[in-house]
Image (cartoon, rainbow, N blue to C red):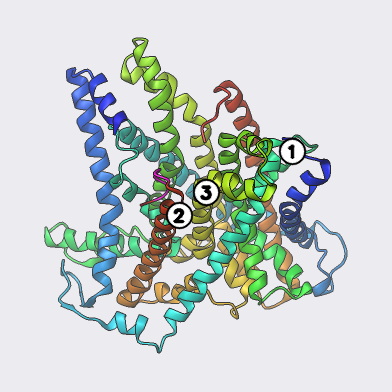
Amino acid sequence: MNRLKADKSAFVPTKTGKKRHRLSRALICLSYFLVLFPLLILFVWSFTGRWSWPHLLPETFSARALGELFGGYSGAVQVLLSSILLSTAVALIAIAVSVPAARAIVLTAFWGKDFLKFIVLLPVIVPATAFAMGVHMLFIRVGLSDTVVGVILIHIILCLPYTVRIMSEVTAATGDRLEAQARVLGASPKKTLISITFPLAMPGIISAFCMAFIVSFSQYFVTLLIGGGTVTTYAMFMFPYIQSGDRTIAAAYSLLFVLSTLLVFIVLERRIKKYYNIEDVFFFS
Amino acid sequence: MSYSKLKICLMLLPLSILMAVFFIGLINGVMESFGVFPAAGLTKLTFSYYQEVFQDSGLTASLLLSLYISLTASVFAVAAGVLVSTAATVGGLARSKFFQIVKLPVIVPHTVCALLMLNLFSQSGLLARIAFQIGLIQNQEEFLSIMFDKNSFGIILAYLWKEIPFVILVVVTVMANINGSLGEAAQNLGASKWKVFINVTLPLCLPSIATSFIIIFAYSFGAYELPFLLGATQPKALPVQAYVEYIYPDLAHRPYAMVLNSIMIVFTVFISYFYYRLESRLKRTGGKNEPA
């Protein structure tokens, strides 16, 4: 809020300045519209009974899609829940791997550091399709294909560029001086970890969790190939509906996907922010 | 604090193991493209698959299509994303709760993006209906075919809807931080608001902007979902074509898929290495304290 006021007072009301200001407002409003309008249409489609050409509004509404999702016969809810569980596990393991690695990368010097920093980026750069097809044969040989463990492993690898990067930035910003101080003042390593390291890293951990969760939760191709149809995630489950012509069902599945991701994030952020008393904006709430 | 060598190794061990799996996967794929594929009874190193694929004109068409899609999508996404971030920073909105709405598409998967675009831009979509209602067209078929067309507008639009917010997510916080701290200092020294923005804030944001560009470029070059759902039947984008070859019933056909994959791997690794060098240079010239 302070920054907002400072900006306004520093703002010189010249003619062009005013015009630019209005222009930037208009641009922001336009982007709100462009983001929300397609989602609004998705929402409307989810509850549509009949909406034939060339009507601008649906002719009839129906709760057919609600039955499909929550009626119990499609199994959508079970897949959704197990999918959320899988992606949560992926995100947590990715973070557990990234936190110590980021500390080593930022706080210490070792041989091959620049090389490591480069190759950690690669899973997000190299097409996941090419990686998945390459690793597929390998996984078949060691018995990891068609298993949940195999899918989790692949998802973790695809999350690492994000989680390592985010945790590195946070570690670089906080450093380890406070921890050193705590140790000097007599805190045990465990106590230092719980009351200094974790709270300091928490904003980064939340961002990293959100990013990893999205990467895993929306993964389609890789899960299809490595899971081989025996491991079904929600992203896979809804794919055939999107391909098919039934817009109402497809829209409802999509809407549920977006809403459940939002819910996971909001619950997580609320809880952790409250616990650690953080006020920054991370992702949404 | 000091860390022993052993401790550093332990801290990096899990990451190293996972990265090793990643590389073994890539190398395995590349080996298969050279015909080393024991599961199909192939063991001899050969360049023949490469020769065959390169002689086929289909490869060039797929490669050009993928390049066209990813370049167009990433250039426009970054331009628009930076523009919106600028507007938000200048308007002092970057931290407002309401502005976070703009980041919503980041959590929407590409498959759903495809559906959103179909709802709006297909020949039975809302835009076509509006065009009909105001008398621009007389029937569905007269509406521009945006989806499934050779010009790939549908794919590009879907990428833009999803990736512009990604650019904003990466850039806007950095931009607001720099403009807030250094910008105020420069303003106090008498520089005008826009001069500060162009000469101080924007150059310092370049690493983040470049990062978002390279991620979007590489992603849209190698992603399967959108070209599969919204692409024309011919030519197919590189990843889609690769999967078509991959699921060919005869296992001995698989090296062809791996040739396409290897082309994608080499291309993206090369680009990202170039980017990595550039980024380290940008960081060095752009000042030491790179914002978190």
Kindly identify which numbered label has been placed on residue A202: 3
Q: Nearer the viewer, residue A35 or B123?
A: A35
Three-letter amino acid code of the residue under disc 2 = Ile
- Mark 1 lies on residue: A113
- Measuring from the top left, give residue A270's x and y in whole percent: 39, 56
Q: Is residue B144 magenta?
A: no
In 3D space, how far apart are the residues under numbered discs 3 and 1 (Cα atoms)? 25 Å
Q: Is residue A281 magenta?
A: yes
Disc 3 and disc 1 on one polypeptide chain? yes
The stretch of residues the image draws in magenta is: A278-283
Q: Name the side, left or right, on which A51 lies relative to A192.
A: left
Q: Secondary structure at mark 3?
A: helix
Q: Secondary structure at mark 1?
A: helix
Q: Nearer the viewer, residue A231 or B26?
A: A231
Question: Which badge, 2 or 1, comes first in the chain's sequence?
Answer: 1
Q: Are marks 2 and 1 in contact (CB under 8 Å)?
A: no
